[in-house]
Image: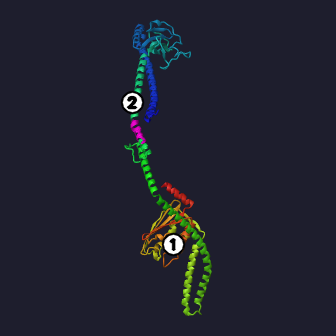
Amino acid sequence: MRISLISKLTIGTSLILLVFMVFFAYINIATFKTTLMEAAISDADKLSETIIKSTHYEMLEDNRKRAYAMIQEVGTLEGVQYIRMINKSGTITFSTDKDEIGRYLDKTEAGCNVCHTSGEPKVQASTMNRSRIFFDKAGKQVVGMAKAIYNEKSCYTSACHFHPPKQRILGVIDIIVSLENMHTMIGTYRNKIIFLTIFLLLSISLAITIFTHHLVNRPVKQLLTQTKRIAQGDLDAQVKDVTNDEMGELTDAFNKMTASLKNARMELEEWAKNLEAKVAERTSEIKQMQMQLIRSEKLVSLGRLVAGITHEINNPLTGILMFANLTKESPHLDPSLKTDMDVIINEAQRCAKIVRGLLDFSRESIPQKKQVSLNSIMEATLTLIGRQSSFHNVDIIRDYQPDLPLVLVDENQLEQVFINMLLNASQSMFSGGSITIRTYAEDEYACIRITDTGAGISEENMGKIFDPFFTTKTDKGMGLGLSVSYGIIERHGGKIEVRSKLAEGTTFTIKVPLNPQGKEALAASSTVS
């Protein structure tokens, strides 16, 4: 049998309320009973005190008849069972119940044992200690109050009485009061409490049921209906009447989840439609990676080949330059041949320059690394080449990250890379322009981005720019600058990325790995941000 959520909540809440309300009612009735009992004992004590004080004068005058008449009148009050007076020897001298007048009471009798429990009688006893609760002959519960009649000065100095001053107690007045009225009041109060408890329990249960239905059950049913519609594939349905509470937040989250599922399905459908294009794009990326690997292997192989060739060429070339200069300076040289010797020397120097470039390209020198900032290396580079003519109409825009982590690099080699990049950028802007230099940290790299507003690189040349001896400059350059730069950054464990568009400019991004301390600093700054 399926029990609804609202029924479970109502039953569970009602049981909890019932337990607490029964406990509260029990404590309340017990407290009320204790309060009434204390009030009854207090009333009996006050009644005893009233009788003693009201009959004091008649006792001093030895008008016993009048005193007993007054006690008899008090005994007729509602609830008073009987009143009796007991003298110091334990004999009942007067009682509203005439049958017990003259009866002797032992010290162990009820009403006497309160003050005679330890051999010597107590002179003082508290109100609660002087009271006793018991059942009378008719089986009804009553409370008894015994109050001592003290030997005051007016008593032992009176003309009609002779009581030694050392005698502290003359006797005891004992009053028995019925507790029937108290039990009636307790019964009435208990019935009211039970009725009120049942009424409150039903009212609260009804209120909980109504509010639970309105605030919980109805939204849950709406969510259940929505879930079934989603299971059937209907992702356009939305739950209406969203409340401004936790259920409303749940409903809103459910609606967002439905919208996300719908978007995900649309994306999957779109992705399925464009799968071929995505595969082609991924294939292109893989080809670029392969080209990069091939380029690296080509550079390594070519570097080794060039190193051998330049070594073999450099020695005879040095000899040619040395003997050509000696011949030019010889006084025996025919003046008509001096111009030819100048051509020989210039061309030999040009070959030497090419050889030096090849040596720089092929030399895999071990980087002398130390911790430096890319910002400081770039500033040093700009100071070095900023006065060249190609930079006269170029604006340098600096956008440095001030807290850029340090990197472990060879400062001279990185400066050579920056020189190559900046010279290429300035030479690509024939009529002037701007170079924007931005430094930042990304992932586990310290990055420097150099963006120019030059002529840009065509699509067909993008795959060749890092090849040795490739250049688009017809008047100068050997096409080794970017190849050398690529090799330096690769030996540092970094990478160079390039983006370009004809007539708009080119952006080179150089990424150098952070050292462990730099990575920790970057992680800490990312956490704070």
Whether tag 2 and tag 1 are in contact, CB under 8 A, the answer is: no
The residues tagged by marks 2 and 1 sit, at their Cα atoms, a distance apart of 87 Å
Image label count: 2
* Label 2, residues with CA under 10 Å away: few <14, some 14-19, many ≥20: few
Q: Position of residue 80 (x, y in %)?
A: 42, 13
What SS does tag 1 mark?
Answer: helix
Magenta part, dominant SS: helix
Specify whether 334 is left or right of 143: right
Q: Residue at x 46, y 55 (%)?
A: 272
Q: Residue at x 39, y 14 (%)?
A: 78
Q: Which residues are magenta?
A: 211-224
Asked whether residue 448 is in view, the answer is yes
Q: Residue 14: x and y, percent?
A: 44, 31
Q: Is residue 17 above or below residue 128?
A: below
Identity of the residue drawn at 55% across and 62% down:
514
Name the one closer to the observer, 75 or 193: 193
**Which residue does the numbered mark 2 point to in the structure image?**
203
Place of residue 491 in the rendered image (x, y in percent of width and height, measured from the top left): 57, 67
Q: Which residue type does callout 1 highlight?
A: Asn
Q: Helix or strand or loop: what does disc 2 sit on?
A: helix
Q: Mark on residue 420?
A: 1
**Which of the marked residues, 2 or 1, is nearer the chain's N terminus?**
2
User: Mark 2: which amino acid?
Assistant: Ser
